[in-house]
Image (cartoon, grey):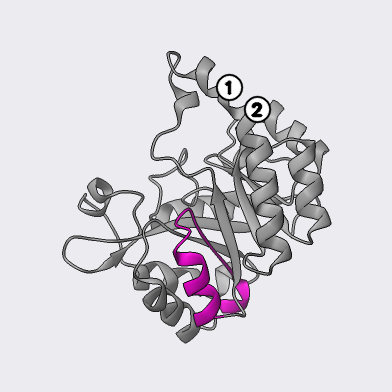
Amino acid sequence: MSALSYRRVGHKGADLIAPGNTLASFDAALAAGVDMVEFDVLRAPDGRLVLAHDLRAAQGPGVITLEEGLDHLVTDAYAGIELDVDLKRAGYEREVLDALRSRGLIERTLVSTMEEESLPVVRELEPAVRLGWSVPKMKRNPLSHPLTRPFALIGAYELRRRIAKRVAARLRAGEIDAVMAHYAVVDRRLVRVVEEAGGELYVWTVDDPARIARLERLGVTGIISNDPRLFSG
């Protein structure tokens, strides 16, 4: 654990240092001093579970299987490093949990997903694993394009209110343990309701030092970044 007040999480390992969801990216995140490595799991068209964010990446050069990734992350070099296993689709929860369980990684892992149908499946199959709900569900980030950014910012205000209510209910019901939230929907209210409900709040994906500092002041549990070199302390 870092000396900072939040957990430093490397997105896809360290996607701005080395191509994400690869062993090199995980090693770069480790060298940068992360507390947790986040990576994506997707079923490729050939049926394998691979570390990839989307189907194009799942069929690209250098893609590695879930087993290859976990075998690397279970080595002594990664002792004490937590894992955030992000399920990109529903339907292969059992296989992922079996792979984690067989390597003794359940206690070190937080399984996260935007797929609401996966949440009760993971909870039933492995109650001991921490479970995170990623919000809001979106395929593309409207904040990343100058034409859609103004409208996205306006919509974020109402979205924050709805999300705070829904995540609080799920946390109190024991359906999830953590909330993985896009930085645009994170405010003092969300931090407060998650804390009051006994949950954790991780914020994605933050590559701006000023935003990292603001989120630390808000008191979030963890910050997910493509470039973990931006974390200080």
Kind of residue sitting beneath label 1: Leu
User: In percent of the image, x 64 and y 53: which residue is there?
Assistant: 179
Q: Is residue 54 covered in magenta?
A: no
At horizontal 51% and vertical 66% (from top left) the residue drawn is: 119
Q: Which residue is mark 2?
A: 157
- For residue 210, which numbered disc appears in the image? none
The mark closer to the camera, 2 or 1, is: 2
User: Quick one: label 1, few (<14), some, or many (20+) residues within 10 Å?
Assistant: some
Residue 29 visible in image: yes
Q: Residue at x 68, y 41 (%)?
A: 231
Q: Looking at the rendering, in which quadrant would you find the C terminus? A: top right
Asked if one can make out residue 35 in the rendered structure from this viewpoint, the answer is no
Highlighted magenta segment, given as a residue range? 106-126
Q: Say what secondary structure mark 2 lies in.
A: helix
The quarter in which the N terminus is drawn is bottom right
Residue situated in front as seen by the camera: 126 or 84:
126
Q: What residue would you read off at disc 1? A: 153
The Cα atoms of the two marked residues, 2 and 1, are separated by 7 Å
Sort mark 2 into few (<14), some (14-19) or many (20+) by Cα contacts within 10 Å: some
Quarter residue 147 falls in: top left
**Front position in the image: 81 or 145:** 145
Indicate whether 225 appears above or below 149.
below
Q: Residue furthest left?
A: 46
Residue 102 placement (x, y as % from top left)? 46, 86
At mark 1, the secondary structure is helix
How many marks are shown on the rendered structure?
2
Foreground of the two, 223 or 144: 144
Q: Amino acid at mark 2?
A: Tyr
Are discs 2 and 1 less than 8 Å apart at CB? yes
Q: Give x and y (percent) for residue 80.
A: 65, 70
